[in-house]
Image (tube, helix red, strand yellow):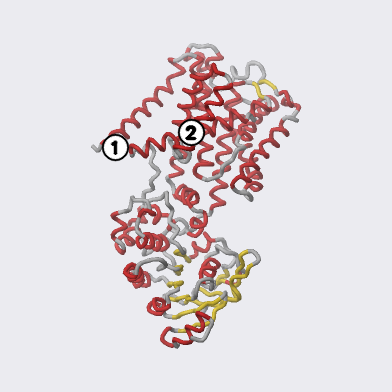
Amino acid sequence: MPETLFRTMMIRGFGLLAVLMLFVVPVIGSRAMVQDLFGVLTLLVLALNWNLLAGFAGLVSVGQQAFVGLGAYTMFACVILLDVDPLWGILAGGAVAMIVAVPVAIFTFRLSGAYFAIATWVLAEIVRLVLAQWKALGGGTGTSLPKGTTKDMWGVQWLKDTLDVSSSAASDALTYWLALVLALGTLAAAYVFLRSKAGLGLQAIRDNVGAARSVGVDPTRLKAWIFLLTAAGTGVCGALLFIQITRVTPEAAFSVVDWKAFVIFITVIGGVGTLPGPIVGVIVFYILQRTLADYGTIYLIVLGLIGIAVMLFAHRGLWGLFADKTGIELLPLRHLPPRSAHSS
Amino acid sequence: MTEPLLATHGLTAHYGDFQALFGVDIKVEEGETIAIIGANGAGKSTLMRAITGLLPSASEAVRFRGEAIGTLPAPEILERGISMVPEGRKLFPSLSVEENLLIGAHAREGNGYWTLERVFEVVPVLRERRHHPGTALSGGQQQMVAIGRALMSNPDVLLCDEVSLGLAPVVIKEIYGSFPQIKGSGAAIVVVEQDIGQAMKVADRVYCMMEGWVTLEGCPADLPRDAIHNAYFGVNA
């Protein structure tokens, strides 16, 4: 067996083991660890979505926090105004984010490059300001989930009895597992999509829009689908995040640092336009966060400097650098011909 | 009287305020090879872009199999059976040779004559380098990938925009050597060429363009050399 293939299999085996271990964390780990890893997994979901958008579709949006906030506020509206289970609110959060993404796409797709980026940020601010006027959800000061909401969530009682833990710990375990499934689902969906015919078209668009159009790829339609689907994924993640946080304010739900700067940092240092990039990025980010958490503002300055250094010296991020040096392809996006294309 | 396979009627095209085509009329019959010759800036590539929907034109200005397709977007025109080898090849650098070929079938798949295997039969070196990046090949091989990519949609009309540009004579000969098999597959071919001699060798009919107008048309054997030079350069040779 060639050495590269052996190493690839080793890393895949290690990855599989890590996933299995992640599934049992709520059973064997502390509640603090569950909450920490919940944060890591939700950031991974946001980074995977942003990577699809910016890294593969070339849509460098800096307004994805709009969909996090929309997801969060929709979930709160479902619970407070419609008195439904927060888990339904998660699905509603994704749906509302996707619906709002339609007019956003119609407006922003007329622009490109820096103008597109600025427009997405402006629209995110507009959404934030509009939701800050919603008095039923606390207006500018925000609101909290009604007492006992997370404890009464579907599945929490069963988990409480099965794991023999408190209602709060059971609620954390449930949201953690949902975040893990969402992260794995997003990764799998991105992998399948990028290896499909549409994924090949998307990579062609990234290389040369004009040439892609001349071979029959419709760049606008493909990009629009990516924009809508990543908006839905980001909205679902936003709703899930705020079930655990249990309190929403416009500043927290539309946080530029938490849901934009960190997400871009994770994707850039891991490797924009590579599937394992966000995974590597979120691990590095978590380690840096743990190591530098006590240094206040310096922590953010160091993150920024690391981001700049990676952009200067490793354009494809840490994973790209590693893959180029070793030849290892963890999640290869190579397209195999369909049967009909082979036969003669 | 039956309509030609592909025809333009009074086709005009603009780049902003600049008019590049002034009422161009051409027609392509089933199985024909047409050459469009002309100097730089004559409007040959613009004509290709207008036919394939990459430049807007009036609906009735382009007709294919009796249907007005002038306002259709590029993917829908390709779906109907008009495929183009763009000037400068325009391969996708992040895709392998095989992927560059496969994406040719993006808009129009089916059980046509052209498959990966058929393309590899015509150009065996592409099979050997199928996993290499498309842009890592020599210029001639890249051109064959671009032609193969266009063939993967099994077109009824293949438009080749300056396929010999910047290539060595031996490579050009190899490229044009593949044309009989392309014609054999049933596709009509439209070749845009600056090389008059090469165009005359392969074409059943020739259109000469100058500054956005068709200045001459006819069968190569019927066209006097002086008339071609006059139509090409706009002066008496």
Q: Alpha-carbon neighbours of circle 2 within 10 Å: few (<14), some, or many (≥20)? A: some
Which residue was labeled with disc 1? Answer: A5
Of the residues shown, which amino acid type is indicated by label 2?
Ala
Measure the alpha-carbon separation of dots 2 and 1. Answer: 30 Å
Q: Quick one: A86 or A132, which is closer to the camera?
A: A132
- In terms of secondary structure, where does tag 1 sit? helix
Mark 2 on the same chain as mark 1? yes
Residue A208 x, y percent position in the rendering = 49, 53
Q: Please indicate whether residue B69 sits to the left or right of residue B154 in the image.
A: right
Count of numbered circles on the image: 2
Mark 1: which amino acid? Leu
* Most foreground residue, A290 or B39: B39
Q: Is residue A12 left or right of residue B80?
A: left
> For residue A59, which quarter of the picture?
top right
| Residue B174 on image: x %, y % | 32, 68
Earlier-in-chain disc, 2 versus 1: 1
Residue hosting label 2: A309
